[in-house]
Image: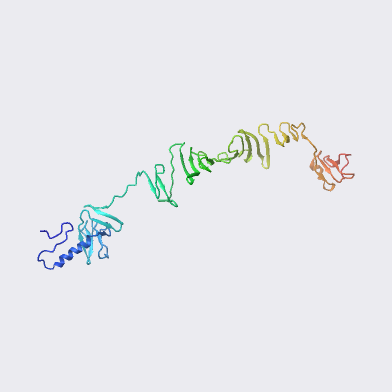
Amino acid sequence: MSFTSQNLNLPYIAPAQAQKHVTHNEALRALDAIVQLSLVSTSQTTPPTTPVEGDRYFVAAAATSAWETQDGQIAAYQDGAWAFYVPQTGWQAWIEDESILQIWDGTTWQNAAPVPDYQNLTQIGINTTADVTNRLSVSSPATLLTHAGNGHQLKLNKNTTGDTGSILYQSNWSGRAEIGLTGDDDFHFKVSGEGSNWTDAMTIDKDNGDLTLGVGFKYTQSLNRLELFERDEPTKLSTRIDNSNFGGAWTLYRGGTEQVKIFATAPYEFNIQNVSSHDFIVHGSLDNLLFVDAGQNRVGIGIAVPTTKLDVDGPIRPKTYTVATLPPAPDNGAGSVIYVSDETGGAVLAFSDGTDWRRVTDRAIVA
């Protein structure tokens, strides 16, 4: 007859045994140590310097001090001393320093349940249901993606140039704004009022960073040039400022062809020209208000085609002066004409002979 139990190796009280309480208490101590087993740690090789009564440890390999030669056993601190128990296959223990339930497989401690494999999952729904299109779905007031180290990148990768890699902003599941690579490799900012018709509000060229606004604005970085045009018909009418001719030119286009250019020819000097003819024309409601004929060096005011150096359709009025405020005649050059309002004998036109102002009526010097 065996004097110990089959599974826990607890001592039996033998027939006619003296001091039966000793054997009984030894069995109780063993039960207290191994039933509802909770281990402070499974990795220590040295006993704690101030052990707590009732604490239990699994003695790791190469143990020292009071645990020496007790590798692989359970050390229980009972009645001020260490008692050792051999774990049996299938024993369960809560590992306190790891907060995990494990099972002794006869050689090592294993997790009571296998760690889930999160690789290549088909769908994940967090507080909501994922589907075949939205395979990762999150319902939350906010979503945090933070760094593990120094930085963090959120990557959206598409297959080919014609595909889409973008962030879509919705209102009640209807699209309102989208940013990203939408149908090509340029960077787009798109908006929609109802989720079906979309407008490119801004596009950044992938090759050179040129910026185009959907309202009719384009900045070409490589040329330092700004263009304004009709959004729906960009070749019908456009204007452009570029860096030619002393740092800036404003050019108007129609049908994609230059029409009028305004540019600096020198500091504080500007040139306005019709690009094709170099004439400068300002139109009124029906006729030319101003026509500068570049080929003939003629100026017409209210004239379709000037025939003299200055051709005016209608009266002209020189500036009015009093005798006391006459400008120096030599400074204005011979042939200049003014109107003198208080000349002796009445108001009169006067011209400069290069030295004095003379009345056009009798050539007398204005006095």
In the picture, residue 37 is in which quadrant? Answer: bottom left
Q: Position of residue 365 (x, y in %)?
A: 87, 42
Residue 274 in the image: state x and y as whole percent.
Answer: 67, 34
**For this view, does 173 lie left or right of residue 22?**
right
Query: As drawn, is 187 to the left or to the right of 67?
Result: right
Farthest right residue in view: 345
Residue at the far bottom: name it: 19
> Residue 230's image quarter?
top right
Quadrant that contains the N terminus? bottom left
Colour setting? rainbow
Left/right of residue 355 with respect to residue 18 in the rendered view: right
Comparing 289 with 51, the one in front is: 289
Against 141, is 263 above or below? above
- Asked whether 104 or 177 is in front, the reply is 177
For image coordinates 25% across by 54% down, the residue present is 103
| Residue 175 location (% of width, % of height) | 49, 43
Quadrant where the image shows the C terminus: top right
Q: Position of residue 254 (x, y in %)?
A: 63, 34
Which residue is more in the foreground, 262 or 36? Answer: 36
Look at the picture and state if 224 lies above or below 102.
Answer: above
Q: 24 above or below 197?
A: below
Q: Quadrant of residue 31?
A: bottom left
Q: How many marks?
A: 0
Residue drawn at the location 37% of the way across and 45% of the way down: 123
Which residue is drawn at the image coordinates 17% and 64% (left, top)?
Answer: 26
